[in-house]
């Protein structure tokens, strides 16, 4: 049997976890706990591997797992135990990423990656959030902002797999192409 890739594992665990969390009316709490776990795993990059491979015995791993589980809800504790038992602790960051994605979709929250020449003012950010929320039927829009002087002017926005390119650089490229084909 072929081994599942990390993204597939993350997606499967996250879907099941969100379904149970919804039944228990604590999906937001589980999101918070998973994000906290993601920080722990980011701070200790070898943690998942240590809990998965054979460098430590099960007796040596037990207190580490218990320490990870303690501050969290029973559901998150069960997830950690199951992932530990199936030697999937290295996949935890993928579970967190997938859970965040599914939770956001369920809540009507979208992520927008915005590139502009200069930083956007608070008013511009608010207007952009409102426009994107209306366009995509979202309840909230989280902006991820960055600058790129190569745009010359305007903005480029990526939401999901769609790119909305309102940059001057793109307009100039289209004008150049039109002039060359005339």
Image: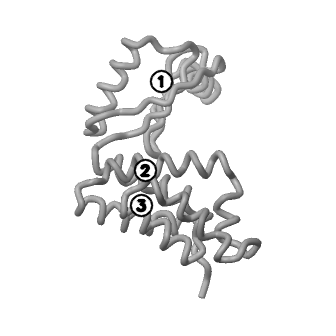
* Residue that numbered label 2 is attached to: 33
- Residue 115 locus on image (x, y percent): 54, 25
Q: Quadrant of residue 94?
A: bottom right
When the figure is inspected, residue 139 is found, relative to residue 24, above or below; the finding is: above
Of callouts 2 and 3, which one flags the residue occurring earlier in the amino acid sequence?
2
Q: Residue at x 28, y 43 (%)?
A: 108
In the rendered image, the quadrant that contains the C terminus is: top right
* Residue that numbered label 1 is attached to: 166
Image check: 163 left or right of 169? Answer: left
- Circles 2 and 3: CB distance less than 8 Å? yes
- Circles 1 and 2: CB distance less than 8 Å? no
Cα distance between the residues tagged 2 and 3: 7 Å
Q: Residue at x 76, y 72 (%)?
A: 55
Q: Nearer the viewer, residue 168 or 140?
A: 140
- Disc 2 packing (10 Å; few <14; some 14–19; many ≥20): some
- Disc 3 packing (10 Å; few <14; some 14–19; many ≥20): many
- Residue 7 locus on image (x, y percent): 54, 63
- Circles 3 and 1: CB distance less than 8 Å? no
Cα distance between the residues tagged 1 and 2: 38 Å
Nearer to us of marks 3 and 1 is 3
- Residue 69 locus on image (x, y percent): 48, 60
Q: Nearer the viewer, residue 52 or 158?
A: 52
* Residue that numbered label 3 is attached to: 76
Q: Residue at x 49, y 70 (%)?
A: 81
Of callouts 1 and 2, which one flags the residue occurring earlier in the amino acid sequence?
2
Q: Residue at x 55, y 58 (%)?
A: 67
């Amino acid at each position: 049997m072929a081994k599942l890739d990390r993204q597939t594992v993350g997606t499967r665990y996250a879907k099941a976890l969100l379904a149970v969390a919804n039944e228990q009316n604590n999906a937001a709490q589980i999101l918070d706990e998973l994000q906290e776990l993601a920080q722990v795993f980011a701070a200790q990059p070898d943690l998942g591997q240590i809990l998965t491979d054979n460098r430590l015995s099960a007796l040596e791993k037990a207190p580490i797992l218990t320490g990870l589980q303690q501050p969290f809800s029973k559901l998150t504790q069960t997830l950690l135990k199951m992932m530990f038992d199936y030697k999937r602790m290295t996949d935890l960051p993928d579970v967190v990423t997938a859970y965040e994605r599914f939770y956001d979709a369920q809540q009507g929250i979208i992520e927008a990656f915005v590139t502009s020449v200069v930083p956007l003012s608070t008013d511009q950010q608010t207007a952009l959030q409102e426009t994107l929320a209306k366009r995509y039927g979202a309840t909230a829009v989280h902006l991820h902002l960055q600058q790129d002087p190569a745009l010359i002017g305007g903005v480029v926005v990526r939401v999901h797999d769609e790119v909305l390119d309102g940059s001057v650089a793109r307009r100039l490229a289209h004008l150049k192409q039109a002039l060359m084909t005339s």
